[in-house]
Amino acid sequence: MTSPAAAPEPTSAAEQAPTGRALRPVKRLVGCYLAVSVATLVAVFLLRDHADVVDAAVWTRTVIVVGSAALTYTFTEGAAGGSRRAFLRLRIVTAAMTVAVAVIVALPGLFPLWLRIEQSVCGLLLLGVVRVVNGRDVRALFRSR
């Protein structure tokens, strides 16, 4: 008799494909990016009555980040399934968001310190994604045949 821990993990067809295996770390990074973004939006909602912590700019930024994180996750899923278009979109969105995060973190006074720290975490997660999806081996999987 085998224990439940010894049972193999069920994997989808996308995860068994070469693109799915190559993008597994990207799915984890993007999943974390989405989770951090949603948690931040929840915190903003809970702190909405504290104008010194949450203002209109914070609301706008956190909503945009959750939307981009959800799109990024969708693109990651598509790319893992082998979609070249989704892979291109993933590369473009993660590069653009990484630059946007760097600007937000670098500009003093634009956002409160706590949000700039959260954006730094998101930026590091996205930087990991950018590094993987722009790597030679992963790009080779999506070259036209």
Image (cartoon, rainbow, N blue to C red):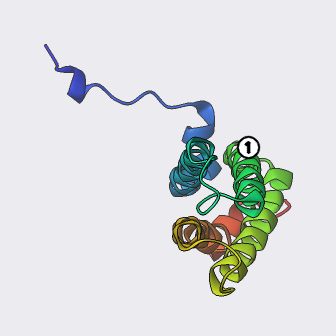
Q: Position of residue 129 (x, y in %)?
A: 60, 65
Q: Secondary structure at mark 1?
A: helix
How many C-alpha atoms fall within 10 Å of the one at disc 1: few (<14), some, or many (≥20)? Answer: some
**Image quadrant assignment for residue 124:** bottom right
Quarter location, residue 99 = bottom right
Up-down relation of residue 144 to residue 38 (above or below): below
So how many labels did they put on this image? 1
Residue 21 visible (yes or no): no
Which residue ends up furthest to the left in the rendered image? 1
Tell me which residue sits at (84%, 59%) in the image: 145
Which amino acid, by three-letter code, is at mark 1? Answer: Thr
Q: Residue at x 60, y 74 (%)?
A: 131
The residue indicated by pointer 1 is: 74
Task: Name the one closer to the observer, 55 or 62.
Answer: 55
The answer to whether residue 110 is above or below residue 83 is below
Q: Is residue 36 above or below residue 123?
A: above
Query: Nearest the camera: 132 or 120?
Result: 120
Position of 86 compared to 117: left or right? right
- The residue positioned 69% from the left and 55% from the top of the image is 62
Query: Relative to 60, is 67 above or below?
Result: above
Q: Position of residue 35 (x, y in %)?
A: 54, 46
The x, y position of residue 21, in whole percent, is 54, 50
